[in-house]
Image (cartoon, rainbow, N blue to C red):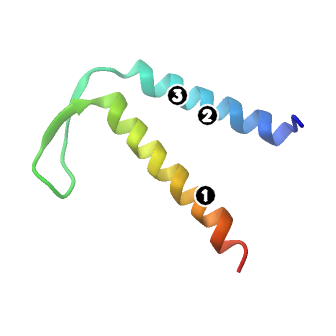
Amino acid sequence: MLTPGRVTVGLLGLLALVFIFENTRNTKIRLLFPEVTMPLWLALLGTALIGAVCGAYWAYFVRRH
């Protein structure tokens, strides 16, 4: 059940969450819309979730075809 790969991914995920929630100050962010001020942890978490969705898509759809 616990393989070295799963343990490694779990530890990396935990380290990413620690990094995200340690950065709590507000920051200015601008992408395609006007500049907004938001907590840095929220921007980091959103970026991590987008990366996880893209990775899951790649693992499920792209590797199967």
Residue 8 picture quarter: top right
Marks 2 and 1: in contact by CB < 8 Å?
A: no
Q: Position of residue 21 (x, y in %)?
A: 43, 22
Marks 3 and 2: in contact by CB < 8 Å?
A: yes
Q: Kindly identify the residue that appears in the image at 85 percent across and 37 percent down.
A: 4
Tag 1 residue: 56
Residue 25 picture quarter: top left
Q: Position of residue 3 (x, y in %)?
A: 88, 38
Crowd tier of the residue under label 3, counting other residues whose Cα lies within 10 Å: few below 14, some 14–19, many 20 or above: some
Tell me the distance, in whole angstroms, between the alpha carbons under discs 1 and 3.
Answer: 18 Å
Q: Position of residue 59 (x, y in %)?
A: 67, 63
Tag 2 residue: 13
19 and 62: which is toward the camera: 62
Tell me the distance, in whole angstroms, between the alpha carbons under discs 2 and 3.
Answer: 6 Å
Compared with residue 21, is residue 6 higher up or lower down, i.e. above or below?
below
Q: Earlier in the sequence, mark 1 or mark 2?
A: 2
| Mark 3 residue type | Leu
Q: Kindly identify the residue that appears in the image at 18 percent across and 58 percent down.
A: 32
In this image, 60 relative to 22: left or right?
right
| Mark 2 residue type | Gly
Mark 1: which secondary structure? helix
Compared with residue 28, is residue 47 higher up or lower down, i.e. above or below?
below
